[in-house]
Amino acid sequence: MSVKRWIKICLNHVLRRYGGEIVPTEILYEWQRVRVNKPCWNNCTLPDDAARYLKPDNPKLIELQQRYRAFDSDVTTPLVWTDRHVRPEDITYFRGDNAWVWQVRGKNSNVLGYALSLYYLKSIDRLRLLDKLVEDNSFGNFTFTVAGRQVSRDLLDSIAEIYFLDQHLGVGSRAGFRVLDVGAGYGRLAHRMVSALPGIERFFCTDAVAVSTFVSDYYLRFRGVEKALVIPLDEIDNTLRDHPVDLAINIHSFSECRTQAIKWWARLLSKHRVKNLMVVPNAVGGTGERLLTRGGHDFLPLLERYGYRTVLKEPKFIDPVVQKYGLEPSWHHLLELRTY
Ligand SMILES: C[S@@+](CC[C@H](N)C(=O)[O-])C[C@H]1O[C@@H](n2cnc3c(N)ncnc32)[C@H](O)[C@@H]1O
């Protein structure tokens, strides 16, 4: 055995204990070769008013923060969404790679993962969503050009979620359908669902984090999707009393909440007889097949306590190979309120 080979075996022996291994550079893809600090947002131009408006000292944001601070701490006390979770620059470049949507730092978040996911979605795209929904790099969004299209995690995840809802609740063909998104981030899915599905009558977005309410309110007005409305946390109870909804959605949000907060939301949804609840958890410690918080707490029993039971759950990508190598694999869960 050559000395070089012997040294490699010895080094690998040590490195494997720490999850590492020496491999030849030529078997790596270029994005795996050098660990560079990835940028947080993509090069983009901002609309004229955006840089002025989307600031931590905007009086509207400050007012929302005061209102949320005065609200029920059961729902507002953060698990991960502390004041430092969103940086000042994330407010301006809210569609960058940040706490709202990881784009280039999550599992398989490389050009191959994006390409595989796009081709998978193309293969199931009976509603022609890839033609109806277009993408751009506004507000720092990362896009990859694949098959002549600009694609992003915003676009691909939204299409996967819409197909799940169409498959199991027929949202593509229903009229007068009303939706509530709890923990709606910057309004990603509201923008996509309202743009794609004419049968959506109303899409409410709400959140227990003031900066998310602030940014989503701006973004949905920017996109001009009038059927999507942002409801501040302290108005959501009255809104649901006056405007019942058919479906609540919670995507990568309950996983980032304390159990008290999840309980608060489950009680609210149950009180207002929201029939269906779609949950996409973070893939905590694995796959996303279980409903876990970032603290490892199983929150399904909490939802069950308020009458919700799992009707079905399935991988984000039905094809197991795509589920393994596609963009940010997780699971889609559908729950129903028991008395229906
Ligand atoms: C990772 S982001 C996901 C955003 C959005 N659902 C999406 O998929 O694009 C998590 C969201 O959960 C919200 N959130 C955090 N704590 C919350 C709580 N206690 N109640 C409701 N939403 C919360 C955050 O403000 C943020 O909008």
Image (cartoon, rainbow, N blue to C red):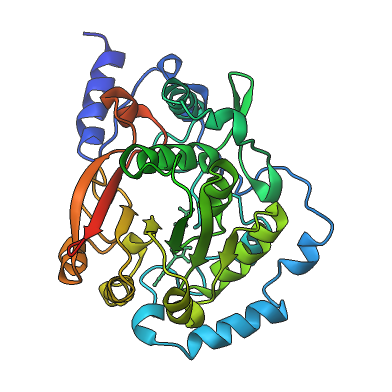
Residue at (20% x, 38% y) in the render: 17
Does 283 sit above or below residue 262? Answer: above
Does 158 sit above or below residue 26? Answer: below
**Can I make out residue 298 in this image?**
no
Residue at (24% x, 55% y) in the render: 335
Residue 199 position, x and y percent, is 51, 47
Q: Quadrant of ligand 1?
A: bottom left
Residue 11 position, x and y percent, is 26, 29
Residue at (41% x, 79% y) in the render: 76
Quadrant in the rendering for residue 240: bottom left
Count of all numbered marks drawn on residues in the image: 0
Residue 238 position, x and y percent, is 46, 81
Q: Is residue 17 left or right of residue 271?
A: left
User: The C terminus is located in which quarter?
Assistant: bottom left
Q: Residue furthest bottom?
A: 70
Residue at (33% x, 52% y) in the render: 282
Q: Nearer the viewer, residue 55 or 48?
A: 48
Quadrant in the rendering for residue 170: top left
Q: Is residue 338 left or right of residue 56?
A: left
Residue 117 position, x and y percent, is 44, 28
Does 245 sit above or below residue 330? Answer: below
Quadrant in the rendering for residue 132: top right
User: The N terminus is located in which quarter?
Assistant: top left
